[in-house]
Amino acid sequence: MTNLPAFESQTSLKPLAFDPAKLSGLSERLISSHWENNYGGSVKALNVVKKHLAQALANKDTPPFIYNELKREHLLRTGSVVFHEDYFDNLGGNGQAGPTERQLIGEAFGSFDTWETEFRRIGAGLGGGSGWVVLGFNVHTRQLENYWLADHAHGPAATLPLLVMDMYEHSYQMDFGAAAAKYIDAFFKNIQWDTVASRMEAARRMS
């Protein structure tokens, strides 16, 4: 097996689209460390895993259980890279949702406040552990829903992420210690709703 394009593409770090020193209630030190060490670590690990997968696939003696351990790591690292990029891309705003986003979310959840209450509650339930909260559009059911994700491997089926909040402790511990609720408050103050609106429009076109 000399040509394995599925394993050859190398992921690179996506630069932040905002100045981390200008966020409200989230320190530059926290954001920079999160981007460089946690997100950056997953980017590097994903590239290494792809190389090992290519080597293992080319070796006919590789046991399936060994290969699947690599595939598990591939799944986790891919999820980490994608969700981290979605997370950082939906930061850097003023936290004020536009009328179109408020209307679409309100129609799906009964009210915008109901959506926000559930999103925050899911995040609070993940405090002190790990996971993600995702507002997504399910292209199969054609619904806007909030999702609880236990880790990087638990992406909701057939769903386009619209708003992503990291609830791993590394996303807030440096600034807030164990006070996850204060981090959630700060997250909401910094949502870049223009990015969410663009994702909503892309989801509308797909559906």
Image (cartoon, grey):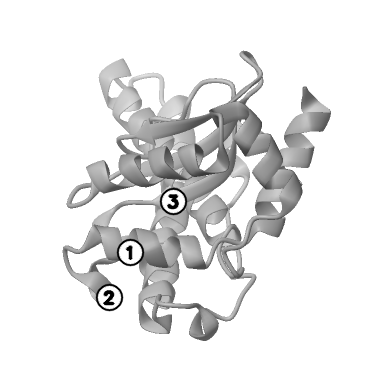
**Relative side of 132 to 100, left or right:** left
State whether residue 3 is above or below residue 171: above
The amino acid pointed to by label 2 is: Asp
Q: Position of residue 143 (x, y in %)?
A: 61, 22
**Callout 3: SS:** strand
First-in-chain label (1 vs 3): 3
Report the number of discs: 3
Alpha carbon separation for disc pair 1 and 2: 8 Å
**Relative side of 130 to 163, left or right:** left
Mark 1 and mark 2 residues within 8 Å of each other at the beta carbon: yes
Q: Is residue 50 visible?
A: no
Q: Circle 1 sits on which residue?
A: 183
Q: Residue at x 83, y 30 (%)?
A: 205
Q: Position of residue 62 (x, y in %)?
A: 33, 23
Residue that lies at the very extreme toward the top in this rendered image: 141
Q: Residue at x 40, y 75 (%)?
A: 26
First-in-chain label (3 vs 2): 3
Residue 165: which disc?
Answer: 3
Alpha carbon separation for disc pair 3 and 2: 16 Å
Q: Nearer the viewer, residue 80 or 102?
A: 102
Q: Residue at x 39, y 30 (%)?
A: 154
- The quarter of the picture where the N terminus appears is top right
**Callout 2: SS:** helix
Bin the neighbour count of mark 1 within 10 Å (Cα to Cα): few under 14, some 14-19, many 20 and up.
many
Q: Circle 2 sits on which residue?
A: 175
